[in-house]
Amino acid sequence: MSALLEEINKRKTFAIISHPDAGKTTLTEKFLLFGGAIHTAGAVKSNKIKKTATSDFMEIEKQRGISVATSVMGFEYKDTLINLLDTPGHKDFAEDTYRTLTAVDSVVLVVDCVKGVEEQTERLMEVCRMRDTPVMIFVNKLDRPGKDPFDLLDELETKLDIKVRPLTWPINMGERFKGVYNVYDNNLLLFSVNKTKVADDQVLIEDLNDPRLVGLIGEEDADQLREDIELINGVYEDFDAKDYENARIAPVFFGSAVNNFGVKELLEAFVRYAPTPVSRPTNQGEIAPTDKKFSGFVFKIHANLDPKHRDRIAFLRVCSGTFERNKFFHHVRLGKKLRFSNPASFMAQRKETVEEAYAGDVIGLYDTGNFKIGDTLTEGSDFMFKGIPSFSPEIFRELLNKDPMKTKQLEKGIRQLTEEGVAQLFIMNYGSAKIVGTVGELQFDVIKYRLEHEYGAKCEFVAKSFHKACWITSDDQKKLDDFKRVKGNFMAKDKDDLDVFLAQTPWILKVEQENNPDIKFHFNSEFK
Ligand code: GDP
């Protein structure tokens, strides 16, 4: 095996996603404990933003600071180098989560057994389905009286629109929760409340008729477990790792993250089955991780918290070849050679300078304004990675300058903030009004605060009654030009100078689609 292939096969890059409060932070922490990346519980801070529009801004700032450190957490488990990418739980930052999902090869979805599948979980799952990302599901909080596990499995299948296969099974729940039976290895892990250490009270039983079973969990529960497992094996297809890899089936695990229960089974299955770095689509076909030449793309940009140092960190996912420190690489969009003297890796929550990185790795590049989200870096080739689209925002407001002396600062600030992906900026064709689009109210507060504190500019937002931004194209250039002319008051350009039609209501959009059969209306910037 080549040295490059060996490096690639060691790596697994994934994200944990959940509805807020389901237990993502807690599960992350337990994973890091198993990986030896941290040694005590409580070391991982939640980057949750609890309050909404009126939140105090220092909290946001503090949390942004924390999320730099926890954006990527590398740890090692059983010779596998695992890169865990953090995603913000708050729904106003959903777009940030979508972009992070472009940089992973698989996902672990956490569901609260009391609440079941919640709204945001459904949305995140839609994004996973769009890209055929393999998903493992962890049903959490079994120490609480929740829904019946069989009902939960049905709910997962219907609401998430994916077939499921339990790989562990709970023995009771709530106060009588005794542990999980490992369906794929046939062993039993008994419950003991264990918040800080790695649990190792695992009992190996050969099969469910092993006489020790009754001694361990009592006759009643042993009977129930045998019955449940028989039912599972009868109803659900055998687990096929290929089906999981192709995103056709999601294995399900039960447990309690806060008690570190059922987590090890999930992690073991993860290192066994989760995919190593996979090929990525570009505008010139797929690029395999084993391609000898380096390539990667930027999926996240983080501003420096210190306003005196305006540099930013661009997070780049390596897709092929070997990234090397101080070597010149090709910035495809700018057609520019760039090299990096301090690329950062994020092992065990420490930032370290990295000499080399391989497919699956995420590195932090200090940037003075060269990068936008979606940018491709290569060893000379001119292809660009696809799959980092912008989606139509949900709230639109016009940005007004409140301090004419600071026009330049405002221009620069809003451009940089939108490049970071805080919001989307559309410039109207007539009059050049700046329309800012977001998925949540909170972003407008963040923009206003940051424009003032980082760029010294003052702004105001005026509500615009737009319903959707549609990227428009046509095979008939004349028809496209006519449409743009007639609809001039509703036409704008996005950050990449693409044509965008801002529809005021769903009805108007429908009418325009019907009246203009030669115009294609796309709801994301990659036209899929
Ligand atoms: P996140 O918002 O998804 O990151 O959720 P957190 O990990 O912050 O957890 C939310 C709350 O649920 C916290 O108070 C946790 O202590 C609690 N929690 C997490 N796992 C469990 C569990 O297994 N059982 C119970 N009872 N509570 C849990």
Image: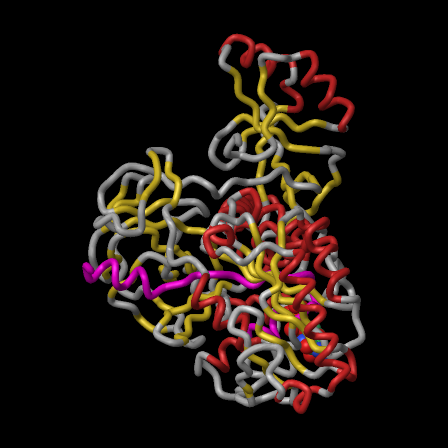
Residue 178 screen position, x and y as percent: 70, 83
Q: Nearer the viewer, residue 162 or 287?
A: 162
Report the residue at 62% width, 32% height from top. Answer: 433
Is 12 magenta? The answer is yes
Indicate whether 161 appears above or below 356: above
Please provide percent x and percent y for residue 159: 72, 50
The question of residue 295 being in magenta is answered with no
- Residue 298 in the figure: left or right of residue 48: left
Left or right: where 235 falls relative to 197:
right
* Residue at horizontal 31 percent and vertical 70 percent from the top: 353
Instruction: Give the camera-side residue of 214 and 190.
Output: 214
Specify the farthest residue to the top: 478
| Rendering coords of residue 393 (x, y %) | 65, 41
Q: Residue at x 50, y 34 (%)?
A: 526
Vertical position of residue 251 compared to residue 401: above or below: below
Q: Nearer the viewer, residue 479 or 159?
A: 159
Image quarter where ligand 1 lies: bottom right
Q: Which corner quadrant holds the N terminus? A: bottom left
Residue 445 visible, this orientation: no
Q: Which residues are magenta?
A: 1-28
Which residue is depicted at the point 57% across and 74% down?
Answer: 182
In this rendering, position of residue 4 left or right of residue 124: left
Q: Is residue 479 above or below residue 252?
A: above
